[in-house]
Amino acid sequence: MTTQTPAGWYPDPYGEPHLRWWDGKQWTDAIHAHQQGAPEEQPPSGPQPQAKPQPQSDPGWSATPANPTLQYGRPTHGQSAYGHPAPAQPQWSGPPPKQRSPLPWVFGGLSALVVLTLIVVAVVFVNRPVTQSASPEPPAPSDRYIPPSQEPPSLPPSQDAGAFPQPSGDQITDPRSGLSFEVPDGWTVPPYASVNSGDPSRQLWTAAAQATAQQNYDGRDHDWIGNVYTGPLHELYPYSGVSGMGDTAKAVYVDFSSRYYTLAHESRIVEDKAMKIGDRDAWVLRFELDFSKISEENGYAWKKENGAIVLMDRGEGQSPAMLYVSVPDNLGTDVVSQVLGSLEPA
């Protein structure tokens, strides 16, 4: 009779001194070293956090938060569960190595030497780690399993998702972030790969809508766009809970401003306050960017850009949801207000 053993970390069935991930059906290639002295029973924890977003340098004109897909065709992303401390690894509890009883002495010089050689070979064989090629299908772990202390390595976002949700009517619902927003009139859902580069150190967007404000604005085949993006906030942006949402929103704004808005402009924050999305605590930081001078010098189709960063708390132990909207004025001056007014928890 077979049993269904839960997924988790177990002693390596191949005899190696580490743990191997059992996915509930078969052994995988995911392993991690055993740490002596760790507690034997640990609850499962969420996926591990990822690295902090790093700015990309771009000689000449670079993309803006309104145009992150155009930093040479690749925007930023990143994703993970939030706020869990590094869990302890399970204590190694594998069986002791088998001991082989010695063979009786065989009288006679040559015979004794042969028997002794056989004993040495047998002991080495018994204690040799079993390789995968020697046992292509090792047995599943027993019902007395070790609770996992961490999740197996997650797939890169480019393999873990692959498509943005499509509108239902005029509303896009993002199940990953828990946010829902209205798609501005005439805007479309872009290809997933044009927004997310697959770099796990960058903010991962899990829903998107955008429109083009000016094609080839810099003469180097770069388009200037307006965007509405949502996703769970990258773990390495500081977040201490509802009371610190305002500080987190400012940290994101400063990072996005220095990373993307490299065209000469003046900026100001026009709104910075707590709000509610349904019954959830949230924060909105609205900003205005003035490109009038450089726009007149270069003949750009837009002069100003309105935008907002919204954070919505999702409860203890989870990163907040983030909405990032940025709209050049030639795409409409009321689009940001329409999007913010349509926000709902998914």
Image (tube, rainbow, N blue to C red):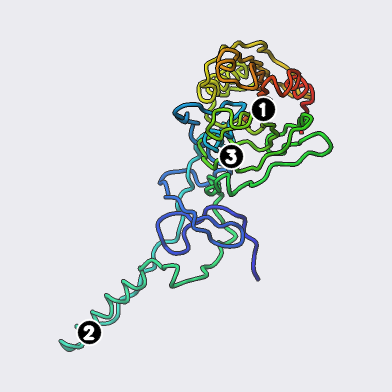
User: Label 1's element?
Assistant: strand
Give the Cα distance between marks 2 and 3: 66 Å
Along the polypeptide, which appears first: circle 1 or circle 2? 2
Return the residue at label 3: 196
Q: Hey, what amino acid is under mark 1?
A: Ala
Whether residue 208 appears in this view of the structure is: yes
Give the Cα distance between marks 1 and 3: 20 Å
Return the residue at label 1: 213
Where residue 148 appears, as percent x and y from the top left, is 55, 48
Q: Nearer the viewer, mark 1 or mark 2?
A: 1
Give the Cα distance between marks 1 and 2: 86 Å
Where residue 98 appears, as percent x and y from the top left, is 39, 68
Say which of 320 and 136 sits in front: 320
Say which of 81 and 266 sits in front: 266
Q: Farthest residue in the right direction?
A: 169
User: Label 3's element?
Assistant: loop
The residue at the point 35 percent across, 68 percent down is 127
The residue at the point 77 percent across, 29 percent down is 184
Return the residue at label 2: 114
Numbered marks: total: 3
> From the viewer's perspective, is residue 118 above or below residue 232?
below
Q: Hey, what amino acid is under mark 3?
A: Asn
